[in-house]
Image (cartoon, rainbow, N blue to C red):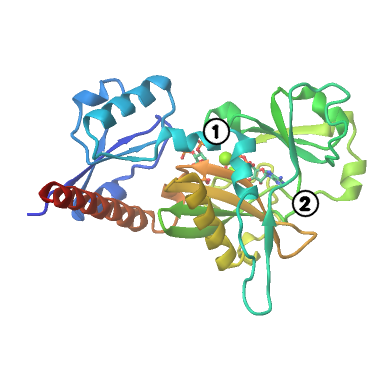
Amino acid sequence: MAKRFKLGYAFTQKKNFIQDSLLNESKQRGIDLIKIDTETPLIEQGPFDCILQKLSTESWIKQLEEYSLQNPNVLIIDSPSKIEILHDRISMLQVVEDLKIDGQVNETETATFGIPKQIVINDVGPLAVEGSKLKFPVIAKPLVADGSALSHKMSLVYNHNGLNKLDTPVVLQEFVNHGGVIFKVYVVGDYVKCVKRKSLPDISEEELDGKDLEESCVTFSQISNKTSQERSGVMCNEATHIEDAVMPPDSLVTDIARGLRQAMGLHLFNFDVIRDSKIGNHYVVIDINYFPGYEKMPCYESVLTDFFCDLRQRKQNLLSEDMKKEEE
Ligand SMILES: Nc1ncnc2c1ncn2[C@@H]1O[C@H](COP(=O)(O)OP(=O)(O)OP(=O)(O)O)[C@@H](O)[C@H]1O
Ligand SMILES: O=P(O)(O)O[C@H]1[C@H](O)[C@H](O)[C@H](OP(=O)(O)O)[C@@H](OP(=O)(O)O)[C@@H]1O
Ligand SMILES: [Mg+2]
Ligand SMILES: [Mg+2]
C-alpha cells in the first residue's frame, strides 16, 4: 500500500480553510491533513511530510526553523521569510511594478496593467501629501497587512480634510473608478482561477464636489471578501450586476499570476485586480493576499487536493534524487 502523505496545518482560529469536504477528498487520495497543536512544541508532533502554515508569531517561526533543521526533507508551504513581502502594502505592490509582462492578448488586442499611485504618510498635517501629485479621492490603507482586523480597516478619503481622522503610518492609494466589480485571482501552485466580487461603486465629480467636512472620510473593511451568496450590501454597489461584468483577459491574469509566483517564490496567494473605467483595457492590481479564503473558490476541494498530490510527487522525486546521489 502506498505510503500516506502526512500534511500538518497551522492557522489562526478565524481561518475556515479546513472543511470536512476537503479532509474527505484528500483522505481518499492518500493525503492525511493533520491539525498542528500550536500550544505544544512542534518538534514533539508529526512526523510531517509537509507543513501548510499561515502564522507569523516569532515563537512559531522559530519552531518551524527548528523542525526544518531536524527534518531537512519537510516541505514548508510557504516559508515565513517569503511571505513577509506581503505584510507591507508598499513592498507587496512593488512586486507587481517590477513584473515584465507583454500585454498582447491576441493578434488585435493588447492590455496593460499596473498599480495605483500610492504614498505612505507618517503624519496627517497640512503638508501630508505636498509634492506627491496624489489625486483625491484616495483609499487609506494600514501600511501593515498582517491579517489583523486593524490591517483591514480602510477609509475612503474624498478630500484633504478627510486625512485628519487617519491613524498613521498609512498608505494613501489613489481611488480608481472600476465599475463596482473587483476580480479576485486565486493562485494554487500552477492553478489560476479568476472570480468576480462586488466592490466600491464609482465616484463621480459631482459627488466629490458635494462632500462636506463630515463626509470627507468613510471607513469600511473587507467589503469584497464575501461571495455574492454571502453578501449583504454594506458599502458595495448593490446596483452593479457583477454577472454582467466582462472578465479580464485570461492570458494577462495568468501571466501576472505566473510572474508573481516566480518573483515571490510563493505557492498560495490571490491578488485583487480592477479594470480602470477610464481606460477599458488597463488593469490595476490593488492587493495581494497570502493564503486567502480558498474555501470560497469554486472546486476548492479538488484544486487543493491536486496541489497536495503535486507536493507528494515533488517530495518523492527529491527523495529518489537523494537516494541516487547516495548510491553514486
Ligand atoms: N485603489 C483602489 N481603487 C478603487 N477601489 C479600491 C482601491 N483599493 C481598494 N479598493 C476597494 O476596497 C476593497 C478593499 O481593498 P483591499 O483589497 O486593498 O483591502 P484588504 O483589507 O486587503 O481586502 P482583502 O479582504 O481582499 O484582503 C477592495 O476590494 C475594493 O473594493
Ligand atoms: O475573498 P478572499 O479569499 O480574498 O478573502 C481573504 C482575504 O483576501 C485575506 O486573505 C484574508 O486573510 P488575512 O488578510 O490574513 O485576514 C482571508 O481571511 P482568512 O481568515 O480566510 O485567512 C480572507 O478569506
Ligand atoms: Mg483585497
Ligand atoms: Mg488584502
- 135 lies above or below 191: above
Q: Which mark is residue 3?
A: none
Front one among 236 and 112: 112
Which residue is found at the position 53% from the left and 28% from the top?
148
Q: Quadrant of the N terminus?
A: bottom left
Q: CA distance from mark 2 to mark 1?
A: 28 Å
Residue tagged by mark 2?
202
Front one among 179 and 109: 109
The amino acid type, in three-letter code, at marker 2 is Asp
For residue 173, say whether it is visible. Answer: no
Disc 2 beta carbon < 8 A from ligand 1? no
Q: Check disc 2 and report its element: helix, strand or loop.
A: loop
The amino acid type, in three-letter code, at marker 1 is His
Q: Position of residue 216 (x, y in %)?
A: 83, 33
Q: Position of residue 117 (x, y in %)?
A: 75, 44
Q: Is residue 86 left or right of residue 35?
A: right
Q: Position of residue 247 (x, y in %)?
A: 61, 65
- 117 lies above or below 177: above
Q: Which mark is residue 87?
A: 1
Please state the total of marks drawn on the protein image: 2
- Which circle's residue, 2 or 1, is located before the other in the chain? 1
- 38 lies above or below 139: above
Give the image quadrant in which the ligand numbered 1 is located: top right
Which is closer to the viewer, label 2 or label 1? 1
Q: Position of residue 277 (x, y in %)?
A: 76, 59
Q: Check disc 1 and report its element: helix, strand or loop.
A: helix
Q: Is residue 231 left or right of residue 123?
A: left
